[in-house]
């Protein structure tokens, strides 16, 4: 449900919720970074005035990125040739902006609210794509191939709407959460949400948006089926921020808040570089391409520093990071570290295999398989989805 309370009772329950979230965040401890890697917090899938359904100006999304303490921002406007001329790209202070575009990929056959439309998110093109590029000149498979040919990454957006499974085999990855889709699914409770927003004079906007956070069961099951079948599919979060939802003058989805609900953290390789300067766009894209990333619902608690890697059982040295394949002897240990106590779940081939509550876990895998981790935090007596890692692929032979 989108709303956390209703009418006059809303303020009291929202204040209690705020205090509970503050307690969660207060118990956070810094996890020392893994040598050679830096954890970058970012947002993938945001729109600006270059999209027909958003008026967001550059200064607004840059301010939003600052409020959400982002290291990188991937802008995916609905395709318009102006993205090549007016779209932001490059370094803005400490923020790396990567530009791209969102292309329609058809819809499922269902009608009304059950109808879902997927998209292709392409970003990080090299300078070889020119402003005269026209997506209409290509079939969808050709378009995906063209973006890749020009050095870009391709992900499936709104992945529940993908009607032809062949696309999953053509791309680098898929959204395993999309904020706009989730809000749409919670549409029926929207009037209650708005009443609470007005009654509390937007004082608890952040707490009201916490209800957007829920485990994406369907998408995770779809993703697990793909990886279990041998596809290496990178999971990312889709913020799909438009800053376009305004009711009676109240902006429901400001960039700064939507950028804080969900982040895709990328572990970039900084081996040999002690420089505190932001890593290059190419280094960032390379880490995303390899799946060295995780999703985190930062509105619950900052997950920076989360670790999931495979380690040599004798030395404890990391031998495989998220997204990597391991096929050597001996089978490694799986190591998980959280920046605060939570529930840690090890998922093998889509099936939960082990669960514990704590801050660290060293786990001996039960043989080859696709392993990923989810972490949960307890809020209002319920475990809430907090972190979703990318998998490590332990192949037969390990
Ligand atoms: Zn979009």
Image (spheres, rainbow, N blue to C red):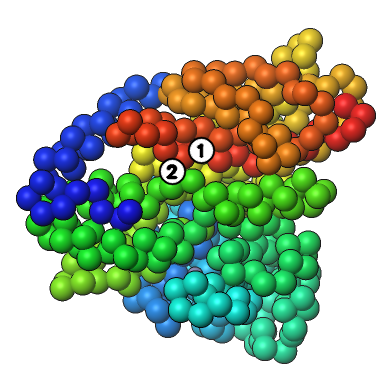
Q: Count how many numbered circles sit on residues in the image.
A: 2
Disc 1, SS:
strand
User: Which residue does the image show at 52% across and 50% down from the upper left?
Assistant: 216
Q: Tell me the quarter of the picture where residue 129 sits.
A: bottom right
Could you tell me if the residues under marks 1 and 2 are in contact, i.e. CB atoms within 8 Å?
A: yes
> In the current view of this chain or complex, which residue is farthest to the right?
397
Q: Which tag, 1 or 2, sits closer to the chain's start?
A: 2
From the image, tell me which residue sits under label 1: 387
Q: Which quadrant holds residue 58? A: bottom left
Answer above or below: position of 259 versus 312.
below
Q: Is residue 200 above or below residue 340?
A: below
Residue at figure coordinates x 74%, y 52% from the top left: 226
Residue occupying the point 33% across, 31% down: 381
User: Would residue 323 be visible to someone looking at this image?
Assistant: yes
Residue 270 % position (x, y): 64, 36
Quarter of the figure that contains the C terminus? top right
Q: Where the N terminus falls, by quadrant?
A: bottom left
The answer for how far apart the CA atoms under marks 1 and 2 are is 7 Å
At x 53%, y 44%, the residue is 295
Residue 140, placed above or below residue 390: below
Q: Which mark is residue 288?
A: none
Is 387 left or right of 159, judged from the image as shown?
left
Q: Is mark 2 within 8 Å of ligand 1?
A: no
Residue at the spot of label 2: 297
Crowding at label 2, few (<14), some or many (≥20) Cα neighbours within 10 Å? many
């Amino acid at each position: 449900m989108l709303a956390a309370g209703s009418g006059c009772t809303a303020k009291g329950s929202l204040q209690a919720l705020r205090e509970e979230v503050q307690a969660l965040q207060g118990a956070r401890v810094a996890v020392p970074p893994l040598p050679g890697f830096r954890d970058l917090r970012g947002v993938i899938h945001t729109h600006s005035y270059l999209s027909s359904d958003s008026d967001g100006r550059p200064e607004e999304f840059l301010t939003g990125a600052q409020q959400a303490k982002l290291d990188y921002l991937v802008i995916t406007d609905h395709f318009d040739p102006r993205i090549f001329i007016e779209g932001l790209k490059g370094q803005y202070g400490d923020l790396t902006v990567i530009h791209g575009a969102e292309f329609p990929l058809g819809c499922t056959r269902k009608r009304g609210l059950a109808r879902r439309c997927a998209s292709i998110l392409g970003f990080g093109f090299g300078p070889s794509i020119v402003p005269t590029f026209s997506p209409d000149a290509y079939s969808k498979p050709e378009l995906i191939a063209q973006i890749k040919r020009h050095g870009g990454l391709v992900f499936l957006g709104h992945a529940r709407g993908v009607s032809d499974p062949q696309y999953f085999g053509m791309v680098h990855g898929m959204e395993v959460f999309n904020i706009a889709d989730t809000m749409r699914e919670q549409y029926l409770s929207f009037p209650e949400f708005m009443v609470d927003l007005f009654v509390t004079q937007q004082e608890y906007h952040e707490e009201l948006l916490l209800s957007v956070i829920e485990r994406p069961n369907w998408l995770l099951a779809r993703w697990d089926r793909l990886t279990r079948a041998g596809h290496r599919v990178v999971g990312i979060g889709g913020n799909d921020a438009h800053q376009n939802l305004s009711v009676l003058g109240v902006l429901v989805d400001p960039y700064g808040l939507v950028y804080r609900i969900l982040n895709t953290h990328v572990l970039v390789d900084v081996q040999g570089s002690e420089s505190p300067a932001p890593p290059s766009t190419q280094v960032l894209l390379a880490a995303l391409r390899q799946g060295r990333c995780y999703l985190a619902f930062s509105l619950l608690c900052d997950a920076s520093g989360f670790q999931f890697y495979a380690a040599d059982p004798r030395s404890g040295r990391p031998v495989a990071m998220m997204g990597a394949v391991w096929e050597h002897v001996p089978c490694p240990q799986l190591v998980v570290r959280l920046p605060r106590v939570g529930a840690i779940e090890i998922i093998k081939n889509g099936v939960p295999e082990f669960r514990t509550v704590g801050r660290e876990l060293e786990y001996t895998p039960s043989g080859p398989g696709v392993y990923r981790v989810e972490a949960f935090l307890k809020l209002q007596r319920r475990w809430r989805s907090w972190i979703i890692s990318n998998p490590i692929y332990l192949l037969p032979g390990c």
